[in-house]
Image (spheres, grey):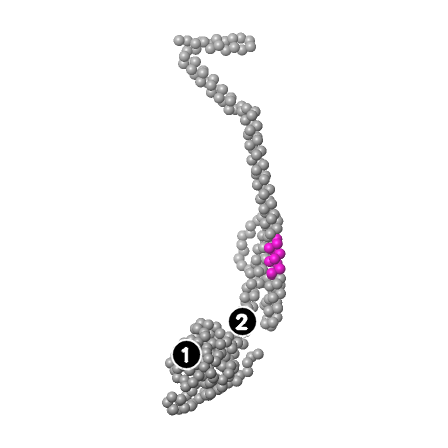
């Protein structure tokens, strides 16, 4: 079977005889050309839809950027306010530090709270960027944090010095281990109240009423708080510089091992536990592990 393909132009008509195979190929090529033409040349409506979609996306992006800008401005305002508060705190720290340094008679050169201390170290890689308003604020906050850290360390050092001076003053042994009562037995050889034989009494006895307060004669660290043979309920306090005090025959103990006590603090309740004939405090002072006469410390003048 044969077919004839007719092609017409404005000037002439062309007839092409074709077989079945040639006709199928020609039909496929014609359909492909139409499909390509349809894809390459979109309709006006499709183009308008694409433009409208793009404009909608741009509008949403603009709104998101505006919202981000507004949020950033609010955050920057808050950061500036916080920076002002930090600056005020820094001024107060400076004033307090200077006042404490003056009261402690410390060198103004060593504790100068108006200047940052000199620092150093190996060279570090620098990041190259242009500062905008937000980076300016961040840089200011970094500087402020550095200053606050420096002032905090200076104050800690000053506190340590002041505390050391205070402890040295408070650990100074002076006075009696009781507020009332009376000195009933001295340091030295005496007749033992139980055996009647001469014996060395290595402390002072302060008699009083059971239940009276027993107080520390200097600040220090409690190294014993419990029963010990002969002493009954005993408290031992280390004061530094090789000095230790002991308080024996207590009815009750008000402190525990590891406690830091201050001068004049109530540490026990007077009793007569251990080898005692009545309510009293057996008071000892040890220097480098050996008992010495506590009497000079009892009548020693206090340091202010």
The disc label shown at residue 233, or none? 1
Tell me the element at label 2. helix
Q: Is residue 199 visible?
A: no
Which residue, given by chain and number where applicable, does mark 2 sit on?
163
- Find out whether the residues at labels 1 and 2 contact each other: C-beta distance under 8 Å: no
Query: First in sequence: mark 1 or mark 2?
Result: 2
How many discs appear?
2
Q: Is residue 238 left or right of residue 111?
A: left
User: Residue 4 location, x and y as percent?
Assistant: 45, 9
Q: Decide whether the magenta segment is chiefly helix, strand or loop.
A: helix
User: Residue 10 location, x and y as percent?
Assistant: 55, 10
* Nearer to us in this view, 303 or 206: 206
Tell me the element at label 1. strand
Q: Tell me the quarter of the image containing the N terminus.
A: top left
Q: Residue at x 42, y 75 (%)?
A: 225
Q: Residue at x 55, y 24 (%)?
A: 43
Q: Nearer the viewer, mark 1 or mark 2?
A: 1
* Nearer to us in this view, 278 or 170: 278
User: Residue 84 location, x and y as percent?
Assistant: 62, 56
Say whether residue 83 is magenta.
Answer: yes
- Please rate how many residues cluster around mark 1, counting C-alpha atoms within 10 Å: few if below 14, some from 14 to 19, many from 20: many
Say whether residue 300 is magenta.
Answer: no
| Vertical relation: 150 (above or below) 213 | above
Q: Residue at x 58, y 52 (%)?
A: 138
Q: Tell me the quarter of the image containing the C terminus.
A: bottom right
Q: Residue at x 55, y 29 (%)?
A: 49
- Please rate how many residues cluster around mark 2, counting C-alpha atoms within 10 Å: few if below 14, some from 14 to 19, many from 20: few
Q: Is residue 73 visible?
A: yes
As measured in the structure, the alpha-carbon distance from the residue carrying label 1 to the one carrying label 2 is: 31 Å
Which range is magenta? Answer: 80-90
């Amino acid at each position: 079977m044969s077919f004839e393909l007719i092609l017409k132009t404005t000037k002439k008509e062309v007839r092409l005889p074709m077989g079945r195979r040639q006709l199928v190929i020609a039909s496929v090529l014609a359909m492909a050309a139409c499909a390509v033409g349809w894809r390459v040349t979109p309709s006006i409506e499709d183009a308008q839809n694409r433009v409208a979609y793009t404009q909608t996306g741009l509008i949403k992006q603009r709104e998101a950027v505006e919202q981000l800008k507004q949020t950033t401005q609010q955050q920057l305002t808050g950061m500036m306010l916080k920076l002002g508060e930090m600056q005020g705190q820094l001024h107060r720290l400076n004033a307090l530090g200077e006042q404490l340094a003056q009261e402690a008679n410390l060198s103004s050169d060593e504790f100068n709270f108006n200047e940052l201390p000199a620092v150093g170290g190996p060279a570090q890689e620098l990041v190259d960027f242009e500062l905008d308003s937000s980076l300016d604020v961040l840089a200011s906050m970094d500087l402020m944090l550095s200053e606050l850290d420096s002032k905090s360390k200076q104050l800690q050092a000053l506190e340590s010095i002041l505390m050391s001076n205070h402890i040295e003053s408070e650990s100074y042994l002076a006075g009696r281990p009781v507020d009332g009562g009376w000195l009933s037995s001295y340091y030295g050889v005496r007749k033992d109240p139980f055996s009647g034989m001469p014996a060395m009494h290595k402390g002072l006895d302060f008699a009083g009423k059971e239940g009276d307060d027993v107080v520390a004669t200097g600040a220090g660290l409690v190294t014993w708080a419990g029963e010990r043979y002969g002493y009954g309920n005993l408290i031992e306090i280390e004061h530094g510089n090789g000095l230790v005090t002991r308080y024996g025959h207590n009815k009750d103990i008000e402190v525990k091992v590891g406690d830091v006590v201050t001068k004049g603090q109530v540490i026990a309740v007077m009793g007569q536990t251990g080898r005692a004939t009545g309510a009293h405090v057996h008071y000892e002072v040890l220097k480098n592990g050996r008992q010495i006469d506590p009497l000079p410390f009892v009548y020693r003048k206090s340091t202010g």
